Image (cartoon, rainbow, N blue to C red):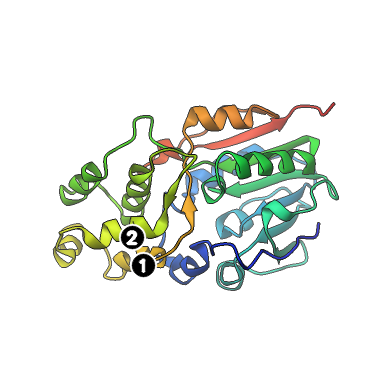
């Protein structure tokens, strides 16, 4: 499959800068070992599958794939490819490209997989376009596997998120960032500008030194939100119902697999079987 280069006029996704902080990230922003085990279970026993990976999540690239797997990854961010991708091998390759510009259908894959991919796209239009493309690129007996980032069933207020942070009721800064971004989103159709999330953090009247001391987080932890500063890129967190409706247009969902880490209930791993195309 060949991808056209990403359009330079589009806002750069924050992952281009996040690549430089990648080693500091953890769940829920990166998949936990239990998420990887869930993904491995969904593809276990497939005979030498041909795999398309959306993004370059290293935990997925290096997980326990079936014997004979051939995996190809696509990501629009050069820094992610250069700094995060674990490297090309005889059975594993990568290229830079935009998922919405892929020539879907040139190759039929047994597995298409990606971690937290939908919030990076505009809802519902771009999400629907990607779902349709995945269906065209997936073999009838194949499976699409993803870990969703879903809006809370009842949206939080940003003030409540900050209150939990100061009250030591949030275990990781990554969980805080996700909760704050979701709380600042009015609805999935408008999403939330990541620069506004950073501004809310920057303007908050809190003692960052005291926060680090109270939580025991490493000194560089708070810098992991800085890549969002001034960025016009938006995140769009669909609800469970919205995502089920969108995926249900062409896929049948398998039972979700939910981990035990903080915010895992908002990040289920789900496998989708394609309905036969007419």
| Front-lying residue, 25 or 232 | 232
For the point 41% across and 35% down, which residue is it? Answer: 265
Residue 226: assigned label = 1
Residue 201 position in % (x across, y down):
27, 58
Residue 9 position in % (x across, y down):
60, 66
| Front-lying residue, 277 or 92 | 277
Examine the image and state in which quarter residue 123 appears. top right
Quarter in which the N terminus is drawn: bottom right
Tell me which numbered mark, 1 or 2, is placed earlier along the sequence: 2
Examine the image and state in which quarter residue 214 appears. bottom left
Which residue is under mark 2? 198
For the point 38% across and 35% down, which residue is it? Answer: 152
For the point 47% across and 35% down, which residue is it? Answer: 258
- Do the residues under discs 1 and 2 have CB atoms within 8 angstroms? yes
| 262 on left or right of 157 | right
Examine the image and state in which quarter residue 73 appears. bottom right
Circle 1 or circle 2, nearest the eye: 2
Residue 107 position in % (x across, y down):
84, 49
Helix, strand or loop for disc 2:
helix
Vertical relation: 248 (above or below) 170: above
Vertical relation: 95 (above or below) 241: below
């Amino acid at each position: 499959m060949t991808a056209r280069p990403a359009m330079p006029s589009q806002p750069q996704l924050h992952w281009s800068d996040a690549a430089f902080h990648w080693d500091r990230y953890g769940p829920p922003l990166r998949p936990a070992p239990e998420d990887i085990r869930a993904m491995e279970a969904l593809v276990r026993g497939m005979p030498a599958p041909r795999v398309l990976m959306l993004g370059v999540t290293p935990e997925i690239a290096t997980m326990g794939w079936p014997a004979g797997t051939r995996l190809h990854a696509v990501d629009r961010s050069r820094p992610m490819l250069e700094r995060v991708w674990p490297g090309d091998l005889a059975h594993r390759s990568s290229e830079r490209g935009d998922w919405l510009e892929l020539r879907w259908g040139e190759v039929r894959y047994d597995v298409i997989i990606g971690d937290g991919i939908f919030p990076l796209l505009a809802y519902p239009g771009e999400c629907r376009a990607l779902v349709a493309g995945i269906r065209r690129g997936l073999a009838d007996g194949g499976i699409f596997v993803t870990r969703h980032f879903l809006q809370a069933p009842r949206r939080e207020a940003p003030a409540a998120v900050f209150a939990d942070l100061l009250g030591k009721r949030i275990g990781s800064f990554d969980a805080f960032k996700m909760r704050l971004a979701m709380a600042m989103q009015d609805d999935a159709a408008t999403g939330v500008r990541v620069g506004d999330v950073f501004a809310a953090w920057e303007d908050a009247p809190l003692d960052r030194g005291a926060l680090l001391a109270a939580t025991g987080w490493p000194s560089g932890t708070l810098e992991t939100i800085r890549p969002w500063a001034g960025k016009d890129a938006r995140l769009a967190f669909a609800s469970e119902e919205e995502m089920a409706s969108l995926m249900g247009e062409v896929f049948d969902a398998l039972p979700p697999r939910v981990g035990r880490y903080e915010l895992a209930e908002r990040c289920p791993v789900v496998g989708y079987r394609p309905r036969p195309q007419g």
